[in-house]
Image (cartoon, rainbow, N blue to C red):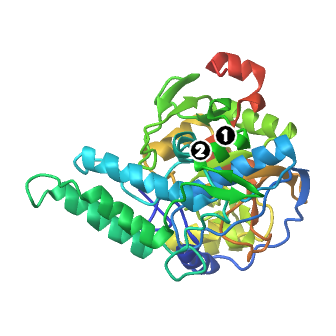
Amino acid sequence: MKKLIALAACAVALTANAQEKADSAATDTVKGFGFVDEIIIPGTSVKDQNQSGTCWCFAGTGFYENEIRKATGDSIDLSEMYTVRKCYEDKADRYVRMYGGTSFSPGGSVLDVPYVWATYGIVPEEVYSGLNYGEDKHVHGEVHNVLEGLVKTVVSKPNRKISTAWKNALNGVLDAYFGEVPETFTYKGKTYTPQSFAKELGIDPDNYVAVTSFTHHPFYKPFVLEVSDNWLWAPYVNVPMEDMKAIVDNALANGYTVAWAADVSEGGFKWNDGVALFPKGKNEGDLTGTELARWVKLSDKERVADKYKFDGPVEESTVSQEERQRMFDNQETTDDHGMIIVGTAKDREGNRYYKVKNSWDTNQKFDGYLYVSEPYFLAKTIDIYVNKKAVPADIAKKANIK
């Protein structure tokens, strides 16, 4: 699977810097779009996953923070690393039970967040930051390698059977790096367990639905999405891509944000410049005269670079369901990154975009947000996660979303 990072299933800031350098060979800082925000849904602040493969958790946690804010007006900062730690525990258990035949990576799905909340609860960020190893920001290379080495050793059974000590060893590593999980804690003068705190937040996972759009399974029925980060083997409701887009549009129009998983390894995804396009690109039939003479002398690599050289709106490809499926089947479209769609905007030519909150800090052009064109969304979306109330009634009926 094509990834922006080797460590994880989602892109992180460390290798994103490398992508930025690669992009700069094709284009200077993107400018001239003249974005005007239309719908903007208030939410919690931009976070920084830094050098960790935990975009899925930042997206899922931030999405639920927005749901809580919509319901109560409260802006609460919840712990991503509590969820990450609990997922590591259960991923390790599943990996060993499957004889090493399943995924054990830092990556995951937005659906891991409701799973942990329902199973183990959640805590505020101030109670559990997960920074117990001499860093101010998340840096997970060492801890993941230690954990991976441990579970691989257990699966290899050097003693011919698995000992009773390996889970204690696993939790010892997790405690050392992330900190011990509190049995109880005090927040705003009240004492909670992680489970009682989760119940007080009022989030019921049954009120949400994960949606995708691929033709290798029937539409309007659920299926287990075949990406390695779906280690829970969770089902996603399958709908045509136009319905998937209609769900997002209806959600935003009614004040709901949407968790979004997508391929971000495309040349048109210029995160530091705050824009993602799916350019049509040129061919010889589009060109005449000196421009054609120049084009035919370019190498294949130079032609690809030219396709993604833009400093404002460009003509984008028309995306069909068949083309979307082809790119998924041949793994041009891969499960890279999780973010949150928080609004809509238009550029100076009237093209429509989704405004997206990222988790790569605020030191980019739009302070941690980016503008994703509708063609990019249609081509490169893996899945979305949304409040069931945001699904249009006709789609909910066909897909049996209740």
Query: Relative to the observer, which residue lies in front, 127 or 240?
Result: 127
Height in image: 199 above or below 269? above
Which residue is drawn at the image coordinates 74% and 19% (left, top)? Answer: 394
Which amino acid type is marked by label 2? Gln
Image position of 2 with respect to 317: above or below: below
**Residue at coordinates 62% horizontally, 38% vertically from top-left?**
320
Whether pointer 1 and pointer 2 mark residues with C-beta atoms closer than 8 Å, the reply is: yes
**Numbered disc 2: secondary structure:** helix
Residue bearing mark 2: 195
Q: Is residue 377 above or below residue 158?
A: above
Q: With 257 as the anchor, is 212 left or right in this view?
A: left
The three-letter amino acid code for the residue at tag 1 is: Lys
Q: Is residue 287 left or right of residue 56?
A: right
Residue found at x 65% / y 50%: 192
Which quarter of the image is occupied by the N terminus?
Answer: bottom left
Image position, residue 357 (x, y; %): 73, 59
Q: Residue 131: give x, y in percent of width and height.
A: 55, 73
Task: Give residue 215's position: percent from left, percent from top.
Answer: 51, 30
Q: Which residue is mark 1?
A: 199
Q: Residue at x 68, y 58 (%)?
A: 186
Circle 1 sits in a helix, a strand or a loop, which is it? helix
- Categorize mark 1 by other alpha carbons within 10 Å: few (<14), some (14-19), many (20+): some
Asked if residue 351 can be seen in this view, the reply is: no
